[in-house]
């Protein structure tokens, strides 16, 4: 791929005034210069929108969109609709990227290939690599989907990938849903013939203590469960093994939620119909079979505890560990 193609970088923004400039600067410092930078202010109530406007005045490659708050998916979709590039890259506004990320990835890209790089988990005091491929590989779409469903080395982070722009002509992020990456990543892989993985760790994923993935709320965990369910419905006809693997992931997500957390009566009453559906799912013989087949022995115990005691299993868990600590 030549260095003449335009790359559109979409940055959804919501109340990130503390981190936004770091993100924008990392994009402007790219060695690859032919960029369209789309900053989508999704109804921020802090200074984020103003910061975006200031940077727009500094660099003509920057386009700023201000819209009423509609969520991450809607913000990404707004950016996609304004993208003029041959390729699209997503960068979350509290993250940052390596100066050579775009250049190295564009060199490997084409109209039918998604390019993926490694990610670093960044916290305030340290940066650690997320397990990734040791060398460059060209995976078929089917091979990449296998890795994605396994959820061991290929996670559902849309930000680590450079996408041919045309694959978004008839595919957008699901608005009004959490865990949107889980709901769309497999579809994106199915839109291309190959996925090129490069070993470099170019994306820095900043973990905030108040992010959705770190705040344990019942609604959040149910959304995670249902996002995996959406993936299962989409790919179950592709390969029979996917049913067992994803079903076990669904069971483990909700089992750990039940065992390790307690929720208010109000939270549970608000989602009572969903909770009954989940109880039925956990009690199915097939679910038990899949969990036993695909998860560790320790996690299987958590599943059995949740299957037997439901949302009361947290009390059993706490009782066990109190007695364990006393014996220790």
Image (cartoon, rainbow, N blue to C red):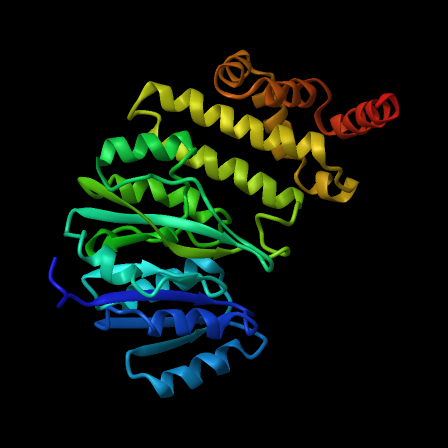
| Most foreground residue, 278 or 295 | 295
Q: Quadrant of residue 306?
A: top right
Q: Quadrant of residue 270?
A: top right
* Residue sitting at x 20%, y 43%: 192
* Residue sitting at x 43%, y 42%: 182
Q: Is residue 118 left or right of residue 109?
A: right
Q: Is residue 115 above or below residue 186?
A: below
The image quadrant where one finds the C terminus is top right
The percent position of residue 111, horizontal first and vertical second, equals 14, 51
Q: Quadrant of residue 235?
A: top left
| Most foreground residue, 140 or 65 | 140
* Residue sitting at x 19%, y 55%: 166
The percent position of residue 66, horizontal first and vertical second, equals 43, 76
The image quadrant where one finds the N terminus is bottom left
Query: Going by the picture, which residue comes out furthest to the bottom?
Result: 57
> Can residue 195 be spotted in the picture?
yes
Q: Is residue 193 above or below residue 29?
A: above
The percent position of residue 149, horizontal first and vertical second, equals 38, 31
The percent position of residue 186, horizontal first and vertical second, equals 33, 39
Q: Is residue 176 above or below residue 26?
A: above
> Can residue 42 be spotted in the picture?
no
Count of labels in the image: 0
Q: Is residue 168 left or right of residue 254?
A: left
| Most foreground residue, 113 or 223 | 113
Q: Is residue 304 above or below residue 14?
A: above
């Amino acid at each position: 791929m030549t260095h003449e193609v335009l790359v559109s970088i979409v940055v959804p923004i919501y109340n990130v005034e503390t981190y936004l400039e770091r993100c924008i600067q990392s994009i402007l410092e790219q060695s690859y210069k032919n960029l369209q930078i789309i900053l989508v202010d999704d109804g921020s109530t802090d200074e984020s929108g103003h910061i975006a406007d200031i940077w727009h005045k500094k660099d003509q490659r920057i386009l700023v969109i201000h819209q009423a708050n509609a969520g991450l998916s809607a913000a990404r979709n707004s950016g996609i609709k304004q993208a003029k590039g041959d390729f699209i890259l997503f960068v979350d506004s509290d993250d940052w990227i390596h100066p050579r990320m775009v250049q190295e990835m564009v060199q490997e890209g084409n109209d039918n290939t998604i390019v993926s790089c490694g990610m670093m988990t960044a916290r305030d005091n340290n940066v650690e690599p997320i397990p990734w491929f040791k060398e460059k590989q060209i995976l078929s779409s089917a091979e990449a989907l296998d890795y994605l469903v396994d959820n061991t080395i290929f996670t559902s982070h849309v930000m680590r990938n450079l996408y041919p722009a045309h694959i978004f002509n008839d595919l957008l992020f699901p608005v009004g849903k959490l865990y949107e990456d889980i709901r769309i990543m497999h579809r994106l892989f199915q839109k291309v013939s190959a996925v090129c993985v490069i070993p470099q760790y170019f994306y820095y994923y900043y973990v905030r203590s108040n992010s959705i993935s770190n705040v344990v709320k019942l609604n959040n965990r149910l959304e995670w469960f249902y996002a995996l369910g959406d993936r299962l419905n989409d790919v179950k006809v592709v390969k029979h093994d996917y049913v067992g693997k994803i079903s076990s992931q669904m069971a483990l997500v909700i089992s750990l939620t039940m065992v390790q957390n307690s929720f208010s009566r109000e939270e549970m009453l608000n989602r009572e119909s969903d909770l009954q559906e989940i109880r039925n799912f956990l009690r199915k013989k097939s679910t038990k079979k899949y969990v036993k087949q695909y998860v560790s022995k320790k996690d299987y115990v958590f599943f059995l505890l949740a299957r037997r005691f439901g949302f009361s299993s947290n009390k059993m868990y706490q009782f066990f560990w109190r007695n364990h600590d006393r014996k220790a």
